[in-house]
């Protein structure tokens, strides 16, 4: 599919005319984590529906707006609500915000998500720094005509989850006494949760957590040369570990750990 770069740059121009100065770092907030935008000071809010060609979040608990401002001394752009493939959007639409960020000149992309634990040693509330992913779903945001001005036809994924940022996160976690894990994320498109058999398969193949987002954004951002940090907030044990998945859980202690880790990353990046 031909990517419409004119639409990308039109959206970027609209945003830039409002915020004037573009931050170097952007943060995508996953399900249940939208509250983090409340920490931003001197904020400017731009609803997705007002940005030309920008897709609008329809998933529960995704506010659907850009929030730009300061956390401490650092400027940051936050996506308070992401776009999922299961909402009915194409892969091009799912990663449209990431391409707009690239067009704006954003260098660092922080991705967060709510995930199910595949690893039997993980527990609800664990924070997992992602170092790799497994993707079975055959569609890709890079399928079709390549945007040469954004990145190469065949891009390397060896360090997609930027090692320097992962090491920074582990150093912050140690200094702040934040329990942290590091593992592999498996992308399944949803919206149904996975079956017990699928979870057993993923565990056998080396996945630690599973979710319905993040990987399309990583593929797009890595293609564009952005530095990427991703962390999963374990909100449930995956299918087959318990009798059923009832609701996602966010413990106060774990939210505090998440807040301190992300604030620390923004301060140091």
Image (cartoon, rainbow, N blue to C red):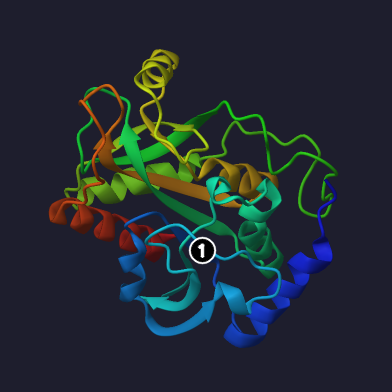
Q: From where the camera sits, is residue 95 visible?
A: no
How would you rate the neighbour count of disc 1 (Cα within 10 Å): few for under 14, some for 14-19, many for 20 or more?
many
| Callout count | 1
The percent position of residue 35, horizontal first and vertical second, equals 31, 67
The percent position of residue 21, horizontal first and vertical second, equals 59, 81
Where is the C terminus found, in terms of image quarters? Answer: bottom left
Q: Is 209 placed left or right of 219 in the picture?
A: left
- Which residue appears at 27% of the width and 54% of the height? 258
Does residue 6 sit above or below 129 in this rendering? Answer: below
Closer-to-camera residue (1/166) = 1
Q: Quadrant of residue 36?
A: bottom left
- Which residue appears at 32% of the width and 57% of the height? 32
Q: Is 153 placed left or right of 220 in the picture?
A: right
The percent position of residue 27, horizontal first and vertical second, equals 46, 61
Q: Is 69 placed left or right of 242 in the picture?
A: right
Does residue 168 sit above or below 108 in this rendering? Answer: above
Closer-to-camera residue (103/59) = 59
Closer-to-camera residue (135/22) = 135
Q: From where the camera sits, is residue 154 visible?
A: yes
Helix, strand or loop at disc 1? strand
Does residue 46 sit above or below 206 in this rendering? Answer: below
The percent position of residue 250, horizontal first and vertical second, equals 21, 51
Mark 1, residue position: 26
- Which residue appears at 32% of the width and 43% of the height? 170
Where is the N terminus found, in terms of image quarters? Answer: top right
């Amino acid at each position: 599919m031909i990517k419409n770069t004119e639409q990308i740059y039109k959206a970027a121009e609209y945003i830039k005319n409002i915020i004037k100065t573009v931050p170097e770092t952007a943060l995508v907030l996953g399900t249940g984590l939208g509250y983090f935008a409340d920490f931003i000071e001197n904020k400017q809010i731009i609803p997705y529906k007002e940005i030309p060609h920008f897709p609008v979040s329809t998933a529960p608990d995704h506010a659907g707006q850009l929030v730009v401002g300061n956390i401490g001394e650092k400027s940051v752009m936050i996506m308070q609500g992401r776009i999922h493939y299961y909402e009915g959007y194409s892969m091009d639409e799912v990663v449209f915000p990431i391409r707009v960020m690239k067009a704006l000149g954003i260098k660092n992309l922080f991705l967060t998500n709510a995930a199910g634990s595949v690893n039997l040693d993980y527990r609800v509330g664990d924070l997992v720094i992602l170092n790799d992913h497994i993707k079975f779903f055959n569609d890709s945001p890079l399928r079709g005509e390549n945007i040469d001005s954004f990145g190469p036809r065949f891009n390397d994924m060896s360090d997609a989850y930027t090692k320097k940022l992962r090491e920074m996160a582990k150093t912050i976690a140690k200094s702040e006494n934040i329990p942290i894990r590091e593992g592999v994320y498996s992308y399944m498109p949803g919206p149904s949760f996975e079956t017990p058999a699928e979870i057993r398969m993923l565990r056998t193949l080396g996945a630690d957590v599973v979710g319905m987002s993040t990987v399309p954004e990583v593929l797009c951002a890595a293609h564009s040369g952005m530095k990427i940090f991703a962390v999963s907030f374990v909100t449930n044990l995956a299918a087959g570990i318990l009798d059923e998945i009832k609701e996602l859980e966010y413990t106060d202690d774990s939210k505090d750990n998440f807040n301190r880790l992300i604030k620390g990353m923004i301060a140091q990046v």
